[in-house]
Every structure is written in C-alpha cells, then in structure tokens.
Image (spheres, rainbow, N blue to C red):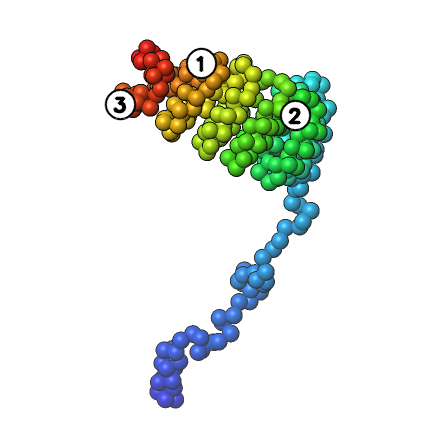
Amino acid sequence: MMTRLLPWICLLLLLPASCRRPDESKPRGDDAAQAGPQSTKPGRPAREQQPDPRAEFRKALAKADKLETREARDKTIAALAWEALELDPEFARETFGMVSPESQERIPLIQHFAMRMADENPDAALEWAGTLGSEREIEAARAQIALVIADADPARAANLLSESAMESRELDVAIVQVLQHWANQKPSDAAAWVVLFPAGEFRKAGVQTVVSQWAESDPSAAFAWVAGLGDEGIRDEATRAMTDAFLQQAPEIRESWLRHADPRTREKLQQAR
C-alpha cells in the first residue's frame, strides 16, 4: 500500500504552497488589520483644526493696541501691517490706519501703499493720497506716485511734484529721479520745464540734473541749448552744471565736448581743467 502511495506523496511535496493550500495566502484576524488601510482616500484634517491667519493677526493687533507707550504700540502695529501685506492687502491697509499720524513708522507704509496703488491706477492712488491726515503724508504719497508714473509720463510726474508747497528730502530725491527719466526721453522738454521756475535750489538742482545727463547723451544739442539761454542767471547755472559734468569725463571725451561748445562756454570749460 505505502509503495503505491509514495509517488503521490512526493508529487504533493513538490507542488507550490499556493496549489496545496490556497487559503494560506489570505490574512486572518490581526494579520488582516495589519495588511494596510481599508480605504484609499487620504484623511483630511478637520477644518476647525486649521488656524485662520487673519484671526491670529487680529488677536495680535488687539494686544498691540493695548500697549502702554505710543512708540511701542506704533512699532508693533506697523510690523503687523508689513507682515500682512502679502496675506491680505486690505487688512494691511486697515492695520496701517491704526498707526499714529506723523509717526516715523507710518511714512514708509504710506510710500509702499502709494506705489502699489499707482501701479494699478495712478488716479485712484492720487485720490487716496488726498485723504491722508497731514501735508507731510500727502506729499510722501504723491512723491511715490510721481516716481511710478515717471517712466510713462515724466511731464505729468514733474508737474505733480512741482505742486508741492513744502520742502523735504523725499521730495528732492523724487524730483531728481523724475527729471532723470524725462531727460533720458526728451531732454529739451525737461530743460524747458526746469527754467520756468524762479531762482533757487529747486531750479539749480533741476538744471544740474538735466544738463549733466543731456550732455552725455547728446553733447551737441546740450551745448546749443546752453548757448541759446538769454537769462544770465540760468545760463550761469547751466554752465556750472556743464562744467561739473565735463570734469567727470575722460580726456578724449572732454576734447570732443570742447568742439561742440560755443566760445564762451568753451572758455569756461578750459579754465576748469
């Protein structure tokens, strides 16, 4: 009997396990629980578990508003406004409105908001600037708006700055930059605009900016303009500006400029060498 069964026993031993006991490949009990997740959908955190950044900002803003000293309060609120700029510009502007007027933290924020608004709509930016609380803040915003529009419309930018009734370093810097844009595009127009102003630091700086840049781009036209000036005061300012620019040039450039200069201006340049 065993002799007849032995070949079959050997055959069964040679078969793969999956053929012999197909249910052994299935997980059972605890094994089934460890075999993997029962669902292919990823779990999502509950919505209430995700903090609302705006709510966190408002909490921080409420705390900042209760700080005892004005300086600490303004610095903290201004920092929150800067932080909120990319998250929510409207909330940032609301936060900026809580900074004390005339504080040193407020002007940079005004300049930033004016720049962003002018990029989209210069007229709306100018209207917003007019709502600010002080002349200094209004002029800071208008100067920034002028810089934004200077490349596309330098004449409008220059006229906007010329309407200012106050003097400030920010305004002086803006005027120089706007005139540089204008002199780069239409130097004759920029020069004609500058000489309309009465004698003073504003006109002197404007003539210096326009003439020095014009002389480098088109010395023949620049020297012809200087030579044609009938007002002696303006001509003196233009000649001094030309001399300053002349002294900054390489020797070969200087020789070229002298060939373009009228006799009177050439004499001044040669004396300065």
Write the residue at 45% across / 16% down: 235
List x then y, in percent, for residue 187: 45, 29
**Distance from the alpha carbon under mark 1 to that under mark 2:** 35 Å
Q: Quadrant of residue 102?
A: top right
- Indicate which disc, 2 or 3, sits on the residue closer to the N terminus: 2
Q: Is mark 1 on a helix, strand or loop?
A: helix
- Asked which secondary structure carries label 2, the reply is helix
Real-space Cα distance between discs 3 and 1?
A: 25 Å
Nearest to the observer: residue 72 or residue 161: 161
Residue at 37% across, 82% down? 11
Say which of marks 2 and 3 sits in front.
3
Above or below for 111 versus 47:
above
Residue pointed to by mark 2? 138
Quick one: label 3 or label 1, which is nearer the N terminus? 1
What kind of residue is marked 3?
Glu
Which residue lies under the disc numbered 1? 236
124 or 5: nearer the viewer: 124
> Mark 1 or mark 2: which comes first in sequence?
2
Answer left or right for 221 relative to 52: left
The C terminus lies in quadrant: top left
When the figure is inspected, residue 156 is found, relative to residue 48, above or below; the finding is: above
Tags 2 and 3 touching, CB below 8 Å: no
Visible residue check, residue 28? yes
Mark 3 = which residue? 252
Q: Dot 1: within a 10 Å radius of its alpha carbon, few (fewer than 14), some, or many (20 or more) residues?
A: some
Tell me where residue 56 appears, x and y as whole percent. 67, 36
Quadrant location of residue 117?
Answer: top right
Q: Residues within 10 Å of mark 3 (few under 14, many from 20)?
A: few
